[in-house]
Image (cartoon, helix red, strand yellow):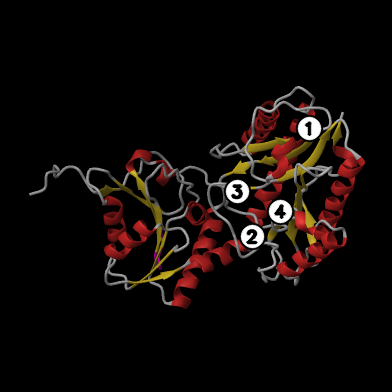
Amino acid sequence: MSVFPSNRPQYFQFHNGEKSALPFSENEYQNRLSGLQAIMRSKQIDVVVLTSMHNVAYYTGFLYCAFGRPYAAVVTATGVTTVSANIDAAQPWRRSFGDNLVYTDWQRGNFFRALEKLVGEAKSVAIETDHLSMDLYQQLKNTFPSAELSSITDFTMQQRMIKSAEEIKLITKAAAIADIGGAAIRNEIAPGKREIDVAIAGRDAMELAIAEQFPDAEYRDTWVWFQSGLNTDGAHNPVTSRVLQQGDILSLNAFPMISGYYVALERTLFVGEATDEQLAVWEANVAAHELGLSLVRPGVKCSDVCAKINALFLEKNLLQYRTFGYGHSFGVLSHYYGREAGLEFREDIDTVLEPNMVVSIEPMLTLPESHVAAGGYREHDILVVNESGATNITAFPYGPEHNIVS
């Protein structure tokens, strides 16, 4: 006999209130779902169980907050259902395309019982193998012992890499908001200011702009990495309370987040002045940036873009200071989730650019503290690939002419 009262359900539906406005139209989500269902038919997959923040958000509009709990979106031939924890009540139903099933914590394992309810007797179940921990993968195997498990990871990534008109519209607006954040950051720069003070100004400006332009959205995750001096050596170094000094190299990084969609503005700046040696490195990185911008067009391989920028840095004897690849895809991602790893400007990525892909060009050089031009130099623009080339949707100026702040 169960120790749990019979009126404590393992899972249930909770349709509380009315559906909220989603980031995109119902037609947009239906097109995404139909695209995944076409992949399922072609691969003879009965059910897809999505567990990552980026894929659940991409196909349903619901961006979950895990906080140690599992979430999912179960896709069948007829529709999609999000599976969410009872701590969120009906918010996942209001904020998602399709249906929702809530699981409770009255009994350990109710998430898997909810999945079992939705998956039923399916014989072929596809999962996100790149997202699952070993424990979660084993529990899914135990939940569906008679089903063949396969990976859906590459197929969903390929689908996300080609952006719709609605996505491009949102990303374009977001890039303009990043420029607003960049201007607020630049205006705050002065000797004696702390990194955190400058970062707050940029973040606040972007959040206010997002709230004004996207009144139906949820607001979270917008952030700034503003780095100075030695702290510029890494692209993802957190903000500190370091005080800016005359002659400091700076790295401005503004990231407005809108309904799970990430964009970025990144610029090198200096406080007051830069030495001739610093200017030479900065201008070399700007030259690499402009070369990369000129190369983005349909039919070009990512690895070829990388090779040409590598050749420029090699000619300038700076290739050894390159920090990472020269750009990546945009969409549903942040510093917590997502990544369209098949669309990056790296030596090992041979993906061919197509219209409606959205990519960055962002060369970075890091010179060690012992070098006369020490610091991290980085510029970053976002481009939308079109039929004949690419449209640059970043407007904030770059280079020594504009970003030595006195």
- Above or below, comparing residue 272 to residue 384 in the picture: above
The residue singled out by tag 1 in the image is 186
- Above or below, comparing residue 369 to residue 306 in the picture: above
The residue singled out by tag 4 in the image is 323
Q: Give the residue type that dot 2 points to.
A: Lys
Q: Secondary structure at mark 2?
A: loop
| Residue 163 badge | 2
Determine whether, in the image, residue 390 is placed left or right of residue 106: right
Packing grade of label 4 (10 A; few <14, some 14-19, many >=20) is some
Q: Give the residue type that dot 1 points to.
A: Arg
The answer to which of marks 2 and 1 sits earlier in the sequence is: 2
Residue 67 at x, y percent in the picture: 41, 41
Q: Secondary structure at mark 1?
A: helix
Seen from the viewer's position, the closer of residues 331 and 99 is: 331
The answer to which of marks 4 and 1 sits earlier in the sequence is: 1
* Viewer-side label of 4, 2: 4
Residue 318 at x, y percent in the picture: 82, 56
* Viewer-side label of 4, 1: 4
* Viewer-side label of 2, 3: 3
